[in-house]
Amino acid sequence: MFRRVLIANRGEIAQRVIRTCREMGIETVAVYSEADADALYLRQADETICIGKGPSAKSYLHIPSIIAAAEIADVDAIHPGYGFLSENEHFAEVCNSCNITFIGPSAKAIAAVGNKSRAREIAVAAKAPVVPGSDGPVEDEPTALAVAQRLGYPVMIKAASGGGGRGMRIARNDNSLVSGFHAARAEAEAAFGDNTVYLEKFIENPRHVEIQLLGDQHGNMVHLFERDCSIQRRHQKLIEESPSPLLTPERRAAMGEAAIRIAREAEYHNAGTAEFLLDRQGNFYFIEVNARIQVEHSVTELVTGIDLIRQQLLVAAGEPLSFKQEDVRLQGHAIECRINAEDPERDFQPSPGLISMFVPPGGPGVRVDSHGYSGYRIPPNYDSMIGKLMAHRSSREAAIRTMLRALDEFVIQGPKTTIPLLKKVLSHSDFQASRHDTGFVERYFGARPSIATGSERP
């Protein structure tokens, strides 16, 4: 096992990795930017190293600084967390060339599934269902128009690299296709340095369900069931739950088996996620692989009892999985809410600044993973997530009740947060009856949700 691990990330996930490492007797090195000098996770690591100024490009995305810190601290491995360099094949290659273990999939696997167009080809080879779309990248307007006419509108224009909803546009006719094609390419180039896009048939009002995968370097691969991530705004997840209330045992097994086939085809190991869309008829379609640990991995930990960070470390150290597929059992129902420093009343405008009071909830069935505290100043440089609030109970109904109680208890004074909107979503009859889909937030709350009055839009 590793002696010393550097966490090439910040905030909640850095803190999460540090906690598991400490339980495993592994020393930790935390890196930080000047903007994160007062971060909570720095107090918990064995050693801390400043790697640059506030902007990500000068710190958490600057590979030479991270590698220099790793060499100075004499670490055995680097955990990239999620975001930043976690799905950067070049970073994985650099780690390996410096004899530092990259705690994640191989650079080859990252490259294979990191390009969504290539991942689609892998899914087809694995005989997994995919959304009808273009045969590879679409390079110009005439080709895009021809593909759209073959598929039938509406279609989705998608960046081949990256994620988070960037480089994505819905087109419902030729005019919106042409404008969306150029806009998606420009946004993808700016965000990921790659303007490659492809087209897929747009599935109206789907559910977004993802399968958690875990594989070792000895050919063993299991799935840890699913997470339903349908409550989103602009393709950014707000609420996740497991198990999905829509899936029958038969469909759950079929999706899990499809995800494993895709992972095997990509020669994948460590933790990863295969994402699918479910249409109204219950058909599921593969859309992408996330070659990293996810923000919402904690939901899976609650319903399976498996520490995914621990498993990542064991797999990266060359250990075989200690359990088989039949050993994994679902235990109750878990819901996670992302607590973001954003103002839903102002189109989710970021709300950085001083947290004057931070009082997290507690009690039976509640877990809080957060780097926030009273007196912490949220920097404007990074993602707005303050933390994750989770409820785990014996049933979905009980988990919703516990989550609503916990959201009522959660006190965050200073920045605006998504807590009022989350309470409205969880209280909505369509969510409670599991009649929601990926368009739920925009449909009922729009750009200016009527949270204060409690009114709901039809």
Image (spheres, helix red, strand yellow):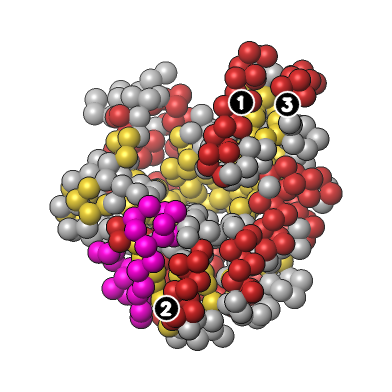
Callout 2, which amino acid?
Thr
- Residue visible at 42% across and 18% down in the picture: 458
x, y percent for residue 242: 53, 52
As drawn, the label of residue 28 is 2
Residue depth check, mark 3 versus mark 2: number of the one nearer the observer:
3
Instruction: Give SS at disc 1.
Output: helix
Callout 1, which amino acid?
His
Question: Is 211 part of what is drawn in magenta?
Answer: no
In this figure, which residue is indicated by the disc labeled 1? 182
**Camera-side residue of 1 and 244:** 1
Q: Where are the magenta residues, as a range?
A: 37-60
- Real-space Cα distance between discs 1 and 2? 45 Å
- Residue visible at 65% across and 70% down in the picture: 327
- Real-space Cα distance between discs 1 and 3? 9 Å
N-term-proximal mark, 3 vs 2: 2
In the rendered image, the vertical position of residue 374 relative to residue 137, given as above or below: below
Instruction: Give SS at disc 3.
Output: loop
Callout 3, which amino acid?
Asp
All told, the count of numbered labels is 3
**Camera-side residue of 113 and 37:** 37
Q: Is residue 107 visible in this depiction of the protein? A: yes
